[in-house]
Image: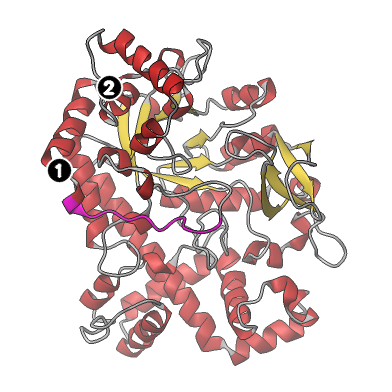
Amino acid sequence: MKKKASQPLFNQRRAGVLLHISSLPSAYYTGDLGVEAHHFVDFLHETGASVWQTLPINAPHADNSPYQCLSAHAGNPDFISLEALLEEGLLSKEDLGGLITNKTALLAKAYSTFIAQEDKKSQQSFTRFCKKQAHWLNNFALYLVLRAKFNQAGWFQWPDVYKNREAKALKAVQKELAHEVAVIKFMQYVFFTQWLNLKQYATSKKVALFGDIPIFVAYDSAEVWAQPQLFKLDAHQNMTVVAGVPPDYFSATGQCWGNPHYDWDAMAKDGYAWWVSRMATQSALFDIVRIDHFRGLEAAWEIPAAEETAMNGQWVLAPGDALLAAIKQALPNIHLVAEDLGIITTEVDALRHKYNLPGMKILQFAFSGTEDNPYLPHHIEPNSVVYTGTHDNDTTVGWYNGMDDAQREHVNAYLRTTHGEDSEPNMPNDLIAMALESQADLAIIPMQDILALDTNHRMNTPGTVTGNWHWRFHWQQLSLAQKDFFTQTVARTGR
């Protein structure tokens, strides 16, 4: 199949690294968009890697999962660089002197300073941002102040006048909490400004930013509260069915994610404007966007809301063709990648191929013992993104060490075939080299594998709710030998 001109990023072989913003080194409790983010771009540039993949960057709930967010548009304010605000004179050295575990108070102080400075150019920029993003920002800001008003309860637990968005009640809250609403809008303004500064810097270093969106949104989110008619809810706005996946590699009882399903008929009435708007935001922030659980655009697993596991669900068709056509028509230059892992049918493959979307290949899934395994390197087609593992996998060192003898021998036998009979396994370098040597146009290596870290450093364990999303690295973990190996392998494999 001839590649379309609309996918120039994949017309050359590229290498990249998977690292979430929260995993960057930082003096605070999470990584941010400041100096270390720019240093990471420098690291990629120095090694010849030209893609930085992150997890979703939206504002999460208290569990910090980037796949269950408060908004499909709003950025995570924890990623705002306080040092950058110090340089702009919006915070003082004293503000940054103590232990900081919550940025909200500092960002509110920065807003007060911002207003008091009467910098007309900056304030005009803020006003323009609020107007341009009003289609989601107004609802999001109001949603967050109401959430705070009701002790962080979900919108479906609020008094009916707020839950049902009665105009008089909302107008009163907007007046009563006008300052708090303005602070939330300011936080988003700062996030978007800092992100686009990082994107501009990455572009100057020939590094593309690769984002990720969950196919579904959280029930407790600004979008479901603001437009409940677009989701499968009952007359009381309770979910009738929830999203998830049937039993698979990761879980014997499947995964019950708890997200509401879309009412696709309602979305079709205005040409999928909700989705087009969502993708427009992501396209402005990223050069490439991965649609997580892409197969859900062809058919999604619907689980009755009362079920405790995902086992008793059913596949329900989705209008992926019409949706992708609407997105492509509105955003012809958007670069999409399909996360096509799990139970993939010929219909899902046909949908992906129709829109020429690269799929994903995971080397940790390749060694099942069968020669027809689609993840084996010699089966990987160019229009693919190959990974050693993703954020949902163990690190390569952990994966290899955790195998039984039969599995390990299968991996070793494959390495002897490709690297010579006398080769001794060397993980994770062997798998990194295998990914970079493959025919896939884009090869992505998790930072944990570049650092040769074990299971203790994995990002997420699917099916668990604690201990995830907290991993961070520091530059002292990166040896010169590790950096040289990655650099040389990127160059040797023509990436």
Q: SS at mark 1?
A: loop
Residue type, label 1: Ser
Q: Residue at image x 25%, y 8%?
A: 420
Q: SS at mark 2?
A: loop
Residue with the mark numbered 2: 425
Q: Residue at image x 58%, y 72%?
A: 138
Asked if one can make out residue 388 in the rendered structure from this viewpoint, the answer is: no
In the displayed structure, 33 sits above or below 395; it is below
181 left or right of 320? left
Q: Nearer the viewer, residue 299 or 307?
A: 307
Q: Nearer the viewer, residue 67 or 183?
A: 67
Residue with the mark numbered 1: 479
Q: Residue at image x 51%, y 59%?
A: 466
Residue type, label 2: Pro
* x then y, percent, for residue 200: 29, 52
Q: Residue at image x 65%, y 53%?
A: 274
Q: How many marks?
A: 2
Mark 1 or mark 2, which is nearer the start of the sequence? 2
In the displayed structure, 130 sits above or below 472; it is below
In the displayed structure, 179 sits above or below 491; it is below
Quadrant containing the C terminus is top left
Q: Is residue 98 magenta?
A: no
Q: Which residues are magenta?
A: 465-476
* x then y, percent, for residue 404: 45, 27
Q: Is residue 467 magenta?
A: yes
